[in-house]
Image (cartoon, helix red, strand yellow):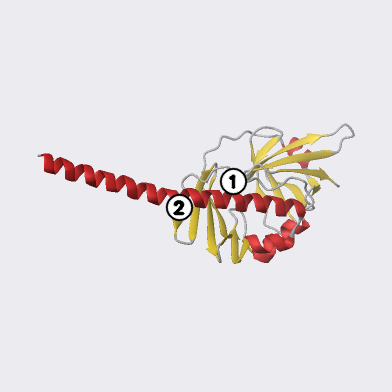
Amino acid sequence: MLKTTLVVLAALSMHAVAAKAQSAPTESVKTELAALMADLNKAFLAKDRAALERIYADEFLFIHALGGPVDKKGQIDAIMASTGSAGLPVTSSFDGLIVSGETAILRRPVEGRFGTTIYIKRAGRWQILQLQGTPIPTTRPTVDVSPDVLRSYAGRYKQDNGLIVNISVEGAELVLQVEGRQKLTLTADSETRFTLPAAAGQITFKAGNGGTMSYELVRGNGTVIKGTRQQ
């Protein structure tokens, strides 16, 4: 009996040591990836193309939940062309991170979609290999907005990141389209607030004192973008 007990205790002890050994590298990788994301934020704010070239892997691909894939050049060009002052939100948690050799995968559910980020380590340095957003069907409650109110939002808007956005009314729905991209049908949460597909963000319209219509778009990652109607 004593011998059996000692064998069991020894096995449990070995298991605990092995688990601790496995978790140590993962914690180290989390620290390294947090530093990588902080560097990304700095490079975004400084419009540092050289730093962005180092951060994104050559095979980088962003598979957007709402549009076509964006490669490394497209991603960096978009950052360099942006005029907004807000930085990219730094990932605050790497809970659930999966580490296998020189590859790390972070999968996180977000309202309306599921986000996956793949990191790869080369020559001792982590890079972002892929970003992917997968839409998840939702049963979000909606409200009816009168056609007159919807039409009051229609027009051509310029965002503070330099993008031109067209807002139009199709049937009984409000439609958003960034120039050169696909149309996105908005879901009404109230008379002034609407949600993008896949919960990619919420847009709130506001009329200024001079009658100029504007909106504030809060992306799913927390980035705030403002748009002002030009015509």
Where in the figure is residue 67, as x and y percent of width and height? Answer: 62, 57
Amino acid under label 2? Pro
Q: Name the residue rendered at 75%, 35% in the picture.
A: 149
Q: Quadrant of residue 75?
A: bottom right
Quick check: 134 above or below 123?
Answer: above
Secondary structure of the residue carrying tag 1 is loop
Amino acid under label 1? Thr
The residue furthest left is 1
The residue furthest right is 210
Q: How many marks?
A: 2
Give the mark, 1 or 2, whose residue is nearer the N terminus: 2
131 vs 154, nearest the viewer: 131
Q: Is residue 65 left or right of residue 107?
A: right
CA gap, disc 1 and disc 2: 19 Å
- Numbered disc in front, either 1 or 2: 2
Q: Quadrant of residue 131?
A: bottom right
Q: Is residue 135 left or right of residue 213?
A: left
Q: Are marks 1 and 2 in contact (CB under 8 Å)?
A: no
For residue 91, the mark is 1
Where in the figure is residue 2, as x and y percent of width and height? Answer: 12, 39
Q: Please rate how many residues cluster around mark 1, counting C-alpha atoms within 10 Å: few if below 14, some from 14 to 19, many from 20.
A: few
Secondary structure of the residue carrying tag 2 is helix
Where in the figure is residue 23, as x and y percent of width and height? Answer: 42, 48
Which residue is label 2 attached to? 25
Q: Name the residue rendered at 16%, 40% in the picture.
A: 5
Where in the figure is residue 230, as x and y percent of width and height? Answer: 86, 47
83 vs 124, nearest the viewer: 124
